[in-house]
Image (spheres, rainbow, N blue to C red):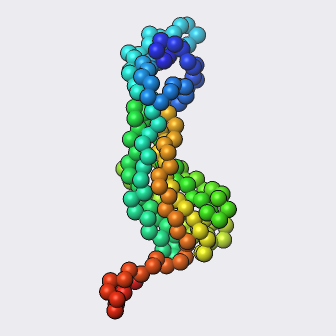
């Protein structure tokens, strides 16, 4: 029920029902159980402000000969339980998504994207990629984080420390 209007009948015990409520709208949610005999009393209503999650930000991004490793900041659910994070790997030459990795919501917000090795892995040497992250909750998906662009297999540029020496 949303604001005393029955919106769905669900079989089973652990289900997700789309609420079809606009972001930012306040709604009172309650549930009941029903069998052949009758419907139970509804639970006490819980007031929620519906909203998609905040945008996570990529905090670290490092790649080496074996793949790319990234971590990102926590996304806030805005009144909804965080379900997962989506990490998008995009081939910037073709603009095609190579893969969408779905990462469970946990305190460890990190992912390793492996280099291509036969039928396994994703990253190919010399190819140009972008990676970005979104948060997903019951209301939907957050906007994309700022992308990190890289060419896999090409070393990072050294840092010029002094005109006479450099650091790799």
Establish if 47 lies above or below 159.
above
Q: Indicate the position of residue 91 as horizontal and vertical percent values.
A: 62, 62
Q: Indicate the position of residue 46 as horizontal and vertical percent values.
A: 38, 21
Establish if 165 lies above or below 140.
below
Establish if 141 lies above or below 88.
above
Q: Is residue 15 visible?
A: no
Q: Indicate the position of residue 54 as horizontal and vertical percent values.
A: 42, 42
Residue occupying the point 53% across, 7% down:
38
Residue occupying the point 60% across, 75% down:
126
**Furthest residue to the left?**
162
**Furthest residue to the front?**
163
Q: Is residue 99 visible?
A: yes
Please state which of residues 88 and 102 is positioned toward the viewer in this rendering. Answer: 88
| Numbered marks: total | 0
Residue occupying the point 47% across, 59% down:
111
**Furthest residue to the bottom?**
164
Quarter location, residue 115: bottom right
- Identify the image quadrant of the C terminus: bottom left
Residue occupying the point 34% across, 92% down:
164
Quarter location, residue 36: top right
- Report the side of 160 relative to 154 (left or right): left
Q: Indicate the position of residue 18 as horizontal and vertical percent values.
A: 55, 28
């Amino acid at each position: 029920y949303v604001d005393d209007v029955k919106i769905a009948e669900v079989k089973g015990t652990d289900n997700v029902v789309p609420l079809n409520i606009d972001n930012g709208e306040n709604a009172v949610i309650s549930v009941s159980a029903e069998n052949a005999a009758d419907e139970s009393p509804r639970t006490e209503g819980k007031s929620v402000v519906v909203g998609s999650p905040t945008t996570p930000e990529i905090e670290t991004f490092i790649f080496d000969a074996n793949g790319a490793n990234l971590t990102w900041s926590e996304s806030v659910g805005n009144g909804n339980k965080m379900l997962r994070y989506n990490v998008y790997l995009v081939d910037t030459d073709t603009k095609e998504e190579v893969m969408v990795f779905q990462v469970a919501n946990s305190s460890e917000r990190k992912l390793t994207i492996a280099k291509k090795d036969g039928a396994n892995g994703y990253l190919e040497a010399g190819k140009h990629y972008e990676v970005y992250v979104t948060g997903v909750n019951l209301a939907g998906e957050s906007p994309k984080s700022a992308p990190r662009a890289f060419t896999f297999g090409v070393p990072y540029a050294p840092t010029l420390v002094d005109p006479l020496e450099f650091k790799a």
